């Protein structure tokens, strides 16, 4: 088993998901479950911290595509932070920076959320 | 050295320095906008020119696009212009603006003293620099022209480099994307191989597509046997109903169809969900799936490569999904086989084993099923009064339904065994029960008898069964035991079943059988028939019951090429010598 893991915490009233290990076809459904849970609880200002994520496959990116409209539909957003170069490269390659805020660190994301609301 | 010489030396040193500096800056730069802007600013600043512009040549369309202009308000950047009056101007280093096309001349404010410079490398023409006249209206001097030319050459080279660099970057990026696509395919093929859960495969497929193609809307319609259903979807604002699902599946024939306005009428749900393309997936020339994808989040149109990737990934997923169905079928089949084999052993348990000894009679009985379970039945059972019941029956049909009815008959027979009623009455009760319990197309042919050992008498009822054959000692003629009534389960008993007694003398032989014997077929579709059966009995009449049974079975099997199409049962008794 790949050591994929998701931790959930809150920071300045925002939801933060910390991803660990490898997010691939197999582990994508765990991320899906976490996002669904947040959306069902109307918790839609979400920061996903990638600092401990080593690898991401297309299926992992697909989960973000599948839920971004739901999140924005209820007035929130998903902001992505702390990606290593390898992970960022995949997001960049597939065109994600046009649709998502991809930021250096969590404080930038928090600031952005505060400015938006 | 006089003053003017000194001045010109200083000037050329200065110009040389500018060229060097520029070249140093340009070598580093990969940004064409910067290069163009830099060229304009240096020239305008150094030569005190208030108007200048750079046009880039596109050899495919043979046109010039304005990239940057300064002091020329009538020109629009990124717009195409006709510049050259004559083709040969591409060959020269510069030409006077007077020679340019009339359409551009009127946009250049004042063409007096103005020049067009060729932006070229070796033999290739890349663009044109327009340089308006100097602010002080003086003409350009020889060394200034050389300076401009020099700068143009360096800048053009840098420009070409930057374009190459951009192209290379794009190529690398595309390659990177392809590699990523391949990795995705590779990862998923591994993943799919491990999975037998259809939902999980569909979900992984969905997410991989959403991520890789950068889309939000997607659906997968799959056909298993004759059932067409929506297996998974994402982002559909309007869910299709089953008839719409079937309609789109049946009418999508081409590999890839790009959705346009024509869909608005025929397939409103496709149109309203902003589906951009439909892809049909076939396995071994049979269409098994239709995939719909929405437009991309960044609005970039799909390329052939994208569709190829989509098809490859979809093929992988569809084959894995198919695999799950096959697996389910196989598991079902295996479960069925296992259940049948259990049923077989239960059914075998319903037959007497061992077959009880009957006083004064040499008895052999056997049933061979053409399938796991069958509808033939025989029984040998003691009655409380010390006699023996012998029975043989054949249920219409084969397999499980026949076996169920056979089991039913067996239990009735054993329930009635200790009840003090005549064979005829017992037959009547069985018939009425079978008639009530079974559909009208299920019957049983049934022969049974009670052997009264003290009197050597067989008292029997034949309910529609092939008449057992009685071969008396010292006779070659067969008597048929056919007294009784209608077969069981056809109608409720109207007239009572008749019963009859036959005396069995020593070495009299009674052969009862089911139609699996006489109706066994050879390759020419010829039946074994009673004539062959009787011949076989006569030939073996002096042997024991068991040996006669073996002989008949072997002959039937040989005749039918070892292939039985129906269950086959034999029950044979021979009355023993008194001394036996």
Image: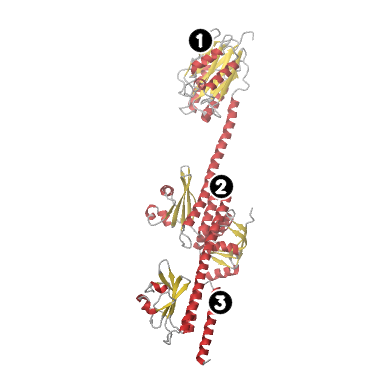
Residue B451 x, y percent position in the rendering? 57, 14
Q: Are marks 1 and 2 in contact (CB under 8 Å)?
A: no
Query: Is B456 left, or right, of B139 in this rendering?
Result: right
Chain ID of residue with mark 1: B
Q: Residues within 10 Å of mark 3 (few under 14, many from 20)?
A: few
Q: Earlier in the sequence, mark 3 or mark 1?
A: 3
Q: Residues within 10 Å of mark 1 (few under 14, many from 20)?
A: few
Residue B504 x, y percent position in the rendering? 56, 10
Colour logic = secondary structure
Give the Cα distance between marks 1 and 2.
69 Å
- SS at circle 2: loop
Identify the residue shown where x is 54% and y is 21%: B558
Q: Residues within 10 Å of mark 2 (few under 14, many from 20)?
A: some
Give the Cα distance between marks 3 and 1.
125 Å
Give the Cα distance between marks 2 and 3.
62 Å
The C terminus of chain B sits in image quarter? top right
In the image, which disc is placed on residue B477? Answer: 1
Q: How many marks?
A: 3
The answer to whether residue B539 of the structure is visible from this angle is yes
Identify the residue position indicated by label 2 in the image.
B197
In the image, which disc is placed on residue B24? Answer: 3
């Amino acid at each position: 088993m790949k050591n994929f893991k998701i931790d959930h915490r809150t920071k300045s009233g925002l939801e933060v998901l910390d991803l660990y290990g490898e997010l691939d076809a197999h582990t994508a459904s765990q991320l899906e479950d976490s996002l669904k849970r947040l959306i069902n609880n109307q918790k839609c200002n979400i920061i996903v911290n990638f600092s401990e994520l080593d690898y991401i496959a297309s299926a992992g990116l697909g989960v973000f595509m599948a839920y971004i409209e739901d999140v924005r539909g209820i007035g929130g957003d998903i902001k992505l932070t702390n990606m290593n170069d390898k992970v960022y490269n995949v997001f960049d390659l597939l065109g994600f920076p046009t649709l998502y805020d991809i930021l250096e660190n969590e404080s930038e994301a928090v600031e952005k959320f505060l400015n938006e609301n | 050295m006089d003053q003017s010489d000194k001045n010109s030396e200083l000037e050329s040193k200065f110009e040389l320095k500018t060229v060097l500096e520029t070249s140093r800056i340009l070598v580093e730069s990969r940004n064409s906008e910067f290069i163009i802007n830099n060229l304009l600013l240096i020239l305008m600043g150094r030569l005190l020119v208030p108007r200048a512009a750079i046009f880039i040549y596109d050899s495919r369309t043979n046109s010039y696009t304005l990239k940057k202009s300064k002091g020329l308000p009538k020109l629009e950047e990124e717009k195409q212009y006709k510049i050259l009056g004559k083709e040969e101007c591409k060959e020269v280093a510069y030409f006077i603006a007077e020679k340019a096309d009339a359409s551009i001349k009127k946009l250049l404010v004042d063409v007096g003293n103005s020049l067009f410079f060729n932006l070229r490398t070796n033999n290739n023409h890349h663009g044109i620099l327009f340089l308006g006249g100097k602010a002080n209206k003086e003409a350009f001097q020889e060394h200034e022209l050389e300076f401009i030319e020099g700068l143009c050459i360096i800048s053009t080279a840098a420009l070409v480099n930057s374009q190459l660099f951009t192209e290379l970057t794009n190529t690398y990026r595309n390659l990177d994307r392809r590699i990523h696509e391949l990795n995705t395919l590779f990862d998923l093929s591994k993943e799919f191989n491990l999975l037998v859960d259809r939902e999980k495969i569909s979900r992984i497929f969905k997410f991989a597509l959403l991520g890789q193609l950068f889309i939000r809307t997607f659906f997968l319609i799959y056909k298993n046997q004759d059932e067409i259903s929506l297996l998974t979807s994402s982002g559909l604002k309007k869910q299709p109903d089953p008839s719409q699902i079937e309609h789109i599946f049946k009418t999508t024939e081409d590999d890839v169809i790009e959705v346009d306005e024509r869909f608005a009428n025929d397939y409103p749900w496709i149109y309203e969900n902003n589906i951009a393309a439909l892809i049909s997936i076939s396995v071994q020339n049979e269409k098994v799936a239709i995939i719909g994808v929405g437009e991309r989040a960044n609005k970039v149109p799909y390329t052939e490569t994208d569709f190829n990737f989509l098809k490859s990934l979809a093929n992988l997923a569809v084959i894995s999904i198919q695999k799950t169905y096959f697996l389910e079928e196989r598991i079902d089949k295996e479960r069925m086989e296992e259940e049948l084999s259990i049923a077989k052993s239960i059914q075998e348990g319903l037959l007497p084993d061992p077959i009880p000894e009957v006083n004064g009679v040499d008895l052999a009985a056997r049933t061979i099923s053409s399938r796991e379970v069958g509808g033939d039945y025989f029984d040998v059972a003691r009655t409380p009064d010390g006699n023996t019941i012998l029975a043989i029956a054949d249920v219409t049909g084969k397999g499980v339904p026949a076996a169920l009815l056979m089991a039913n008959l067996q239990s009735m027979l054993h329930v009635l065994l200790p009840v003090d009623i005549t064979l005829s009455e017992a037959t009547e009760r069985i018939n009425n029960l079978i008639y009530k319990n079974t559909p009208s197309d299920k019957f049983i042919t049934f022969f049974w008898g009670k052997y009264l050992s003290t009197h050597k008498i067989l008292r029997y009822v034949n309910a529609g069964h092939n008449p057992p054959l009685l071969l008396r000692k010292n006779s070659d003629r067969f008597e048929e035991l056919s007294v009784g009534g209608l077969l069981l389960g056809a109608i409720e008993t109207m007239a009572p079943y008749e019963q009859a007694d036959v005396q069995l003398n020593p070495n009299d032989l009674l052969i009862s059988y089911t139609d699996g014997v006489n109706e066994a077929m050879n390759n020419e579709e010829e039946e074994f028939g009673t004539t062959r059966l009787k011949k076989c009995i006569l030939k073996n009449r002096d042997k024991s019951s068991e040996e006669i049974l073996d002989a008949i079975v072997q002959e039937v099997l040989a005749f039918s090429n070892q292939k039985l199409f129906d269950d086959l049962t034999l029950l044979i008794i021979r009355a023993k010598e008194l001394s036996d």
